[in-house]
Each structure stands twice: as structure tokens, then as C-alpha cells.
Image (cartoon, rainbow, N blue to C red):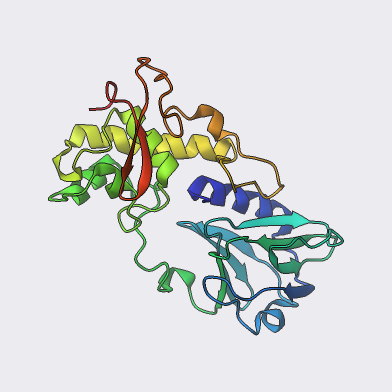
């Protein structure tokens, strides 16, 4: 599933190619996503200029002259900029042509993604209005995590993956940040000290920053906007390494399911 670094990587690539260009034609091949693609999306977008592309949580916000296109990649979605003559693939559900041979295609085999239109500020949309702070913003740090964790009787891993606490800390990056901070993912969020949360907040930022620089993490479904894989997988220290030696102490990496998510950690380095 594309997480924050993968969505940020997609945003950066698409923005470089399409920002400032005018939509020439729109083709909808399949409307049935998590929410249906609006019936009037063709007439709404054609002739409009793409002014900007931003990201909030794992949502991409395409700013046009009369509103915003909100896109979520779901479990298996991707956005690619390809020549308009490129043959349509089986799971290409939407294509937006910008002329100059630039065509933006939304592909989603599982159809859990969404593409919706709003004329209002997208931050106030019900899908985004309850999102927590961005992890790479100055609003997020270890002190904030500590204050938010008081009396919380859930695992610290579930806590930092809660989008109302902080957005975008997905399963892979939660495991990696907790390893770097030396915190066992099974620990209760409300029982962790301020000093340890300060380390965790810092490592969440560093893990996500490094992943963005590497173009995201390719495990199964994710490819970048140019169709190439992300390379952060080569830096993973615990995720997906069950039974392999810890990169620090050589103890075997453990695996456990926490809140229905696979969790990887070292029992010696994380307490």
C-alpha cells in the first residue's frame, strides 16, 4: 500500500511534468472505485489549467482553476505520466490528457482508491478534516507525541499509526522508526517517557525523509510515477526480515501481528 513517502514521490514527479498545463481531454474507463468517479468529471476538467499539486496525509490535491481533484491511491493504485499513445492497460480507470503527449493515468487493480472533485477547500472535506499533523512539519515532534499519549492503553505502534494523531506513519515506517528509537512496538503508548518520545519523533522524521529521498519503498504494488521502483527497501533494518540477524546485535528479528498489521522488531535492541 502506498504510504506517505510513496505519495510524496508521486506528487513530486507529476508536479514536475504537469504543473501549469491545460487539460485537453478526459477519459473514464471505470467509475467504480471506493467512491465513484463523478459523472461530470470530463466536462469539469477539460479546458482547466493544473495550478498546483499538494499532499495532505496520503491524499493528493490537484488544484485547478475552479476547484480541486482529490486522489487517494488506495491499496494498489498508482499515477503515471505516459505518452498519450501508450496502450491502455487492464486496470487503467482514468486518463487525463494535458497535450504535448503528456497523459496522466490512474491505475488501480483492487479499486480501493478514489478520485473525487470539490469546489471547496479540500482540507475541510470530511475525508481530511480530522487528520493529525504532518510528521515532517514543525507541529509534530516528540513532545507532541508524549502529550497525546497520556492514558493511552494501546501499543505505541498502533498509536503512531493513528492518522488522527499523526498522518502518514504507515506500517513499514512505524516499524523502522521504533527500531531506530529502541522502543519495543508492544509497549503501551501511555507508559513511554518524554525522553524516549523525543527520540521517536526525531526518528519518524528521519525515516520518512530518507524514504522520500530514495523514492519510496517497493514491496509489491508500488512503483514511482515514472514506473521505476523506490529504493528505500534496501535500507530496511527490521521490516520484512523475520528470522534474519539484527543489523546491530545479530539477534534474530521477531515478527508479531499488532492490530492486524505485521510488526517486526529486535527483542534485544528494543525495550
Question: Closer to the camera, 224 or 255?
Answer: 255
Q: Say which quadrant the C terminus sits in.
A: top left
Q: Position of residue 238 (x, y in %)?
A: 41, 29
Q: Position of residue 226 (x, y in %)?
A: 72, 47
Taking the view exactly as shown, the residue that stands out farthest to the front is 243
Taking the view exactly as shown, the residue that stands out farthest to the top is 249
Residue displayed at 60% across by 40% down: 215
Seen in the image, is 128 located left or right of residue 118?
left
Residue displayed at 14% across by 40% down: 191
Residue displayed at 41% across by 29% down: 242
Instruction: Look at the image and tell me whether residue 34 can be seen.
Output: yes
In the depicted structure, whether residue 239 falls above or below residue 258: above
Q: Position of residue 115 (x, y in %)?
A: 58, 70
In the depicted structure, whether residue 207 falls above or below residue 250: below
Residue displayed at 30% across by 35% down: 200
Seen in the image, is 228 located left or right of residue 166?
right
The quarter of the picture where residue 156 lies is top left
Q: Position of residue 189 (x, y in %)?
A: 20, 44
User: How many numbered markers are drawn?
Assistant: 0
Instruction: Look at the image and tell me whether residue 203 can be seen.
Output: no
Question: Closer to the camera, 130 or 114?
Answer: 114
Amino acid at each position: 500500500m502506498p504510504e506517505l513517502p510513496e505519495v510524496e514521490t508521486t506528487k513530486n514527479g507529476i508536479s514536475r511534468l504537469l504543473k501549469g498545463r491545460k487539460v485537453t481531454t478526459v477519459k473514464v474507463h471505470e467509475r467504480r472505485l471506493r467512491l465513484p468517479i463523478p459523472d461530470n468529471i470530463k466536462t469539469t476538467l477539460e479546458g482547466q489549467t493544473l495550478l498546483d499539486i499538494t499532499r495532505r496525509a496520503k491524499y493528493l490535491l490537484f488544484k485547478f482553476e475552479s476547484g480541486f481533484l482529490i486522489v487517494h491511491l488506495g491499496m494498489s493504485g498508482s499515477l503515471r505520466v505516459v505518452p498519450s499513445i501508450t496502450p491502455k492497460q487492464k486496470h487503467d480507470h482514468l486518463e487525463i490528457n494535458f497535450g504535448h503527449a503528456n497523459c496522466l493515468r490512474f491505475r488501480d487493480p483492487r479499486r480501493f482508491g478514489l478520485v473525487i472533485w470539490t469546489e471547496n477547500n479540500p482540507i475541510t472535506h470530511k475525508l481530511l478534516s480530522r487528520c493529525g499533523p504532518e510528521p515532517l512539519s514543525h507541529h509534530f515532534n516528540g513532545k507532541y507525541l508524549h502529550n497525546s499519549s497520556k492514558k493511552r492503553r494501546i501499543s505505541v505502534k498502533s498509536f503512531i499509526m493513528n492518522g488522527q494523531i499523526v498522518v502518514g506513519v504507515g506500517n513499514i515506517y512505524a516499524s523502522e522508526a521504533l527500531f531506530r528509537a529502541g522502543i519495543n512496538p508492544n509497549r503501551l503508548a501511555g507508559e513511554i517517557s518524554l525522553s524516549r518520545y523525543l527520540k521517536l519523533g526525531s526518528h519518524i522524521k528521519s525515516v520518512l525523509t530518507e524514504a522520500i529521498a530514495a523514492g519510496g519503498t517497493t514491496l509489491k504494488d508500488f512503483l514511482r510515477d515514472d514506473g521505476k521502483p523506490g529504493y528505500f527497501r534496501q535500507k530496511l533494518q527490521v521490516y520484512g526480515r523475520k528470522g534474519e540477524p539484527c543489523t546491530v546485535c545479530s539477534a534474530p528479528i521477531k515478527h508479531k501481528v499488532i492490530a492486524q498489521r505485521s510488526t517486526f522488531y529486535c527483542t534485544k535492541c528494543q525495550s
